Amino acid sequence: MIDFLLDGAHWTGPEGIPALLLQHLMYTFLALFAAALIAVPLGLYIGHTGRGAVVVAGLANSLRALPTIGLLILLVLVIAPSFSSKLAYLIPSLIVLVLLAIPPILTNTYAGIRSVDPAAVDAARGMGFRSMRILTEVEMPCALPLMLSGVRSAVLQIVSTATVAAYISLGGLGRLLIDGKAQSDYAQMAAGAVLVSLLALAFDLAIGFLTVRVVSPGITRRVRSSGTRSASADTAVAARPTSVPEPSLT
């Protein structure tokens, strides 16, 4: 595997690792964008209004139960006759990845909105905030950690499952797995598995860093600077009993 990765011939040309990596990233970002475009507004609406909560559970469970390879082959058989280009295989692959990414984003968005403290919502409503302003300025900032957690789960599932695109003659890092299996080249298969794992780990760390940067410190209760103490520390100091010197016997 190390020899395969260190071979310069595998890092150049249209079948090289950089080209396959770019294709894998393209599938990932397209699927994530489409899934977020569907799941985030739906999760916000259901969480804010409380209507259709059964839809969230039913849709999430049904989509998670879909067999990836079987659905992919079925979509290729249905869609491929309508196209003469690579879209005949790209569209089914993206549909499968989008369906895979929708449940965690939808569920976490709904759960994040529903978990907002009702007292904060009532206070905003008492200050004259309209429904949309409550959603955008109160509920969404409070729900952001859970929403990003859903995106994080979706990205990891897309990155790991995008390898199925190679099963229907597309590119991506899955080519190393499929071609390696066809040629009984276990070094190539191991290299592909390691590269997919490293890519998933990189996305996980990037989204974790983004979460720390964009979520309000008031939500995470973290301290920005060493000179600032948290409210709990101040409370503990205030509640600490002061020592009273004992009377001297002399």
Image (spheres, grey):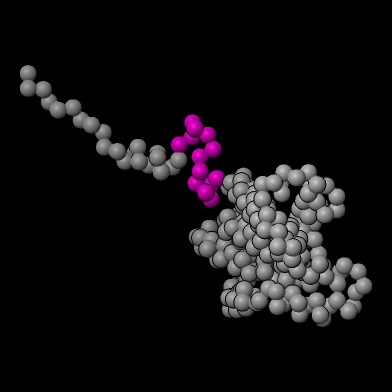
- Report x, y in % for residue 176: 73, 58
To which quarter of the image does residue 42 belong?
bottom right
Tell me what residue is drawn at x 75 percent, y 45 percent.
7
Q: Is residue 235 above or below residue 26?
A: above
To which quarter of the image does residue 231 belong?
top left
Residue at the limit of the structure toward the right, as seen here: 84
Secondary structure predominantly adopted by residues drawn in magenta = loop
Question: Is 119 contained in the magenta span?
Answer: no
Tell me what residue is drawn at x 76 percent, y 80 percent.
74
Relative to residue 132, is residue 86 drawn left or right? right
Q: Is residue 146 visible?
A: yes
- Report x, y in % for residue 207: 63, 51
Residue at the limit of the structure toward the front, as seen here: 184
- Report x, y in % for residue 235: 37, 42
Asked whether 126 or 209 is in front, the reply is 209
- Report x, y in % for residue 89: 82, 70
Tell me what residue is drawn at x 52 percent, y 63 percent.
115
Quarter holding the C terminus? Answer: top left
Q: Which residues are magenta?
A: 217-229
Q: Is residue 38 visible?
A: no
Question: Is 228 contained in the magenta span?
Answer: yes
Residue at the limit of the structure toward the left, as seen here: 250
